Image: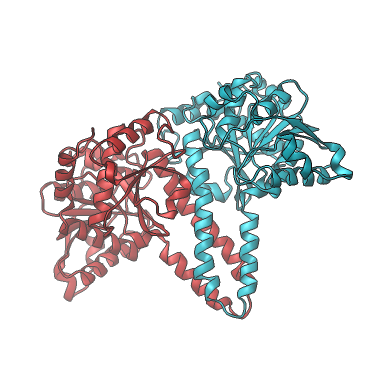
Chain colours: A red, B cyan
Amino acid sequence: MRIALDAMGGDHAPGPIVAGAIQAVEAEPELRIVLVGDQAQIEPLLPTGGARSRLEVFHSTQVIGMEESPGKAMVRKPDNSIKRCYELLASRKVDGIVSAGNTGAMVAGGHFLKLFLEGVHRPGIAAVLPSAKGPVVLLDVGANIQPKPEHLYQYGLMGSLYARNVLGVASPRIGLMNVGEEQAKGHELYREAHAMLSQGPLRDRFVGNVEGRDLHKGGADVIVCDGFVGNVLLKYCQGVFEFLLGVIQSDLVGKLQTERPLAEQACRELAHRYHYSAYGGAPLLGINGACIICHGSSKERAIMNALLVAARYAKERLSDIIVQELRANPPP
Amino acid sequence: MRIALDAMGGDHAPGPIVAGAIQAVEAEPELRIVLVGDQAQIEPLLPTGGARSRLEVFHSTQVIGMEESPGKAMVRKPDNSIKRCYELLASRKVDGIVSAGNTGAMVAGGHFLKLFLEGVHRPGIAAVLPSAKGPVVLLDVGANIQPKPEHLYQYGLMGSLYARNVLGVASPRIGLMNVGEEQAKGHELYREAHAMLSQGPLRDRFVGNVEGRDLHKGGADVIVCDGFVGNVLLKYCQGVFEFLLGVIQSDLVGKLQTERPLAEQACRELAHRYHYSAYGGAPLLGINGACIICHGSSKERAIMNALLVAARYAKERLSDIIVQELRANPPP
């Protein structure tokens, strides 16, 4: 598999981004990475032997800043690294792309280059969160803040294929985020999406409405919502983990004497286990090719995991599977 | 102050509900409570001396179940305890009402009896959550799942008055929940609400858009959102606290030997501090009178705190203040 990596994207680029690429090719012998960005900055960061042969540089002179308006920046900066990644994908020179840069630009790039998969109305970003029973895929978390019911339907299907083929969940169950369990709950968008999911070909995988409190219980493997709700929820999730780990640190660990080092170690392990970097970024599902969006503050570990997820995505031919399954399972 | 308490509402009614009432009158000498519900069940639970004189029973024969459709149940069960509470409020026999029963019925009751405050378009439920800098008021959390921009504007104002007069926050800052900090973020509802809050008379109290991750940081004292987002977020908040405390219990506390009892005690204290019962229920702001909605699983402590909040609400004459401030601060 060949994956293009936006070497200039994110708060820490290019150092830890390139380091993550080196780790990824060392971990996955079949992986080749095209580092897209300023050659003068990237070249000195590359190793001399071994994995070097599977790391290639594609020079690009512009970067879209984290705060720039994505649509405008795409036009104003024609040589930006995200656009170049997408062009490599469009010409099939790579099987997937990874960036920790401007999320909006990653979403805009797909629209700009018309790289939607056949049958997909609007791509959606899928975040992977922990639950008591394993990973949970929450989507959309921000690509589509005012979706139509059929978009949510497609998110259910695409999310379950991602859960099965990339995360290894045997038979993913789909839930619809809502304000109550009864099918008539929520406003029109959610009521219509519920009808599509419960009455159409996905009905056997659909467990109905789920509520916020169910997310970490693992009653559904894929939870569908609009991009506004999902974005608020995902960012809240990051914030609450930080808040609670801080409280645990000060009000529990801080009270211990002899066993404090042990507790501190356990705290670090928990923080590590539930850190977003463990999940390898969020795929933008519906793009023709693996497209992984990483958190802006991603370092080596997050980039490496995202590249490995992109590699698995490509190896599993998830794009082809999504097209086939969308065709085989139209909404009722 | 006189507060009507729905003695039949919630998963544990009437035992712990009545017990909470007894605790509340013992804690607040000026408080009188009207227990609304089945006299035969309530009377035996009352004390014989002391606080008994400030506890009164108002007999009602029907209860709206937790899963019943609120609108229909209001009509089908004319003698239900929530409706009777509202009628006592409408006739000014009480200054406020408290219920741990069907939340939808509490919202519907206000519509049914037309008990909105002058100038209020749609009441909203305000939840109080912890942050690094003190309590944060999040509203609406489910009364109004498809609001208009002016509703969000009013929630900002009402929430800040509640924070100031009941929670004791000196100069509450209002934030708008959104998917990014820039003012153009979000869909139309949020863009219009942002314009109203930033350009109108509340502009000095408005800190702009906030994101999910900011909630527990305490950058805003009042966070406004639509009832769908707020409901998902509130329930998620409850779920994630449970999930993380469970993980801490098993993967941190469980690894300790000699200091495990100390850590377990700290864990219990944290669970107690951040349990919803500490915050005394969620006010339905915009009703003419204090109207506090408690979690269905509320026991003594939650009911007592909710009654004390209702008493404070009445004592501060918050309803009058809301009417005055809405009149003085119309949206631009």
For residue B260, above or below residue A122: below
Q: Position of residue B166 (x, y in %)?
A: 72, 38
Quarter in which the N terminus of chain B is drawn: top right
**Looking at the picture, how far across and down is residue B217, in whole percent?**
56, 50
**Image position of B87 with respect to A237: above or below:** above
| Residue under the point 32% across and 33% down | A195
Instruction: Name above or below for residue B320 compared with residue A17.
Output: above
Relative side of B113 to A233, left or right: right
**Residue B16 placed where, x, y %?**
70, 47
- Say which quarter of the image contains residue B44: top right
Q: Nearer the viewer, residue A243 or B286?
A: B286
Could one spot residue A115 in this view of the protein? Answer: no
For image coordinates 25% across by 65% down, the residue present is A21
A210 or A263: which is nearer to us? A210
Examine the image and state in which quarter residue B259 appears: bottom right
Number of marks in the rendered image: 0
